[in-house]
Amino acid sequence: MTKNLLAERPVYVVGIGFHPYRHRSDATYVTLGLTAVRQALDDAAVAWADVEVAYTGTALLGMGASRIMLSRLGSTGIPMTQIENASASGSSAVAQACLDVASGRSDLALALGLDKPRGGLPMGPAEAGMANLEGGTIVPFTHFALLASEYMSAHGVSPEAVAKAAEKNHRNGANNPNAQRQKIRSLAEIMAEPISGSMTRLQCCPVGEGAAAVIVASEEAISRLGLDRSRAVRVLSSATRTERLYGPGEGIDAALTAETAKVAFEQAGIEPTDLDVLEVHDAFSIEELLYTEALGLCQPGEAASLVANGQFDLGGKCAVSPSGGLLAMGHPIGPTGAGQIGEIVRQLRGEAGSRQQPDARTGLAHMVGVGAVCVVHVLQRG
């Protein structure tokens, strides 16, 4: 099993902040990022001068975006690293910040997820000089429409049952002031406007702009800075894996999710049944079903019925995507994974208001990125 430094030197999330996710605007990325960072600093009750290292996760901004932005808070000379890991960029920034503190290199670290769309998504694999068997003809929503068709056929599940995951998440997003989509949608509305197979517009995530910031600290920093221990949420584990060679017909993202989660659960010393709240990579509605099964919350083919009977609702066995998920909270790429951590922390603190999962103690954040890469964090309140 991979060594878990977080078990040797505990790491805690002490501050979270957001710039609301939304359609592209005229605001600069600096405005987005600093809004989230300042909110996280206020939430943690620390000063920018207390931060010892910063990681910025972004897929779209290009080179050198971090320092010019963060210098507006003060040019302190701290190490700064910019991370690109596709949809998992923000998750990877959090992972690196946790590792920095767990290793003893620093005591207070910032992880910022940030992006603004700039017309299309530049994709490195397109320049790899390796032929793609599908020739780029299968766009993401068609890919997931095919996965949905396969799932429905294998398990006798209807298109409406798949769409119920989106219905739940739009309902959750309606109560999230940071969400891009804040409107309750009926199942009929969600089933309208098909774009590929049974996949509809409201079963696909919006890609806009936004920012999310997470501040992590050691026990030493919490004591030295006099931080509120009652609001510090421990990061039990942080696991990252990339795809390997899989058998014909095996779902890569789901298999990779299962492998990464296995490491995260073993490091955290918990079981899937211990989870009270889960933020999952649900860029398309079928993904919630595939990944909750891969994470071990239920057996293959059972997720749709658990969504239908409310087990993944707020107040259910495990609240899945109480933020609204990527489907309603939105998926501005860089911020998404960091924002998931922010939502889990808010839930475990009991500060989520109308979308609070009762008595939430343990949560998991899961992100998949093109490549493919998977990042899983397990968090727990004391």
Image (cartoon, grey):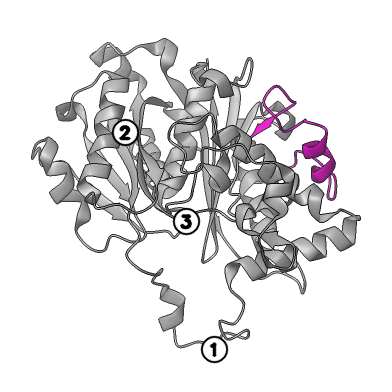
**Was residue 154 drawn as part of the magenta stretch in this picture?**
no
Mark toward the viewer: 3 or 1? 3
Q: Relative to 240, is 1 on the left or the right?
A: right
| Left or right for 112, reference 136 | left
Return the residue nearer the eye: 252 or 351.
351
Prevalent SS, magenta region: loop
Residues under labels 2 and 1: Cα distance?
A: 44 Å
Q: Is residue 224 visible?
A: yes
* Mark in the foreground, 3 or 2: 3
Span colored in magenta: 295-320
Of labels 3 and 2, earlier in sequence is: 3
In the image, residue 168 lies at what x, y percent?
Answer: 68, 37
Q: What element carries label 2?
A: loop
Q: How crowded is mark 3: few (under 14 residues within 10 Å), some or many (20 or more)?
A: many
Check residue 104 in the rendering and tell me which mark sits there, or answer none.
Answer: 2
Tell which of 112 and 313 is nearer to you. 313
Q: Which residue shows up at 27% across the image and 11% down it?
A: 226
Give the x, y percent position of residue 313: 70, 30
Question: Residue at label 1?
Answer: 131
Residue 252 relative to residue 78: left or right: right
Earlier sequence position, callout 2 versus callout 1? 2
Q: x%, y% of residue 257? A: 64, 52
Q: How many C-alpha atoms fall within 10 Å of the one at disc 2: few (<14), some, or many (≥20)?
A: few
Q: How many labels does the image show?
A: 3
Kindly report the distance in space between the C-alpha atoms of the residues bearing marks 3 and 1.
Answer: 23 Å
> CB under 8 Å between callouts 3 and 1?
no
Residue bearing mark 3: 87
307 in magenta = yes
Quadrant for residue 279, please give it: top right
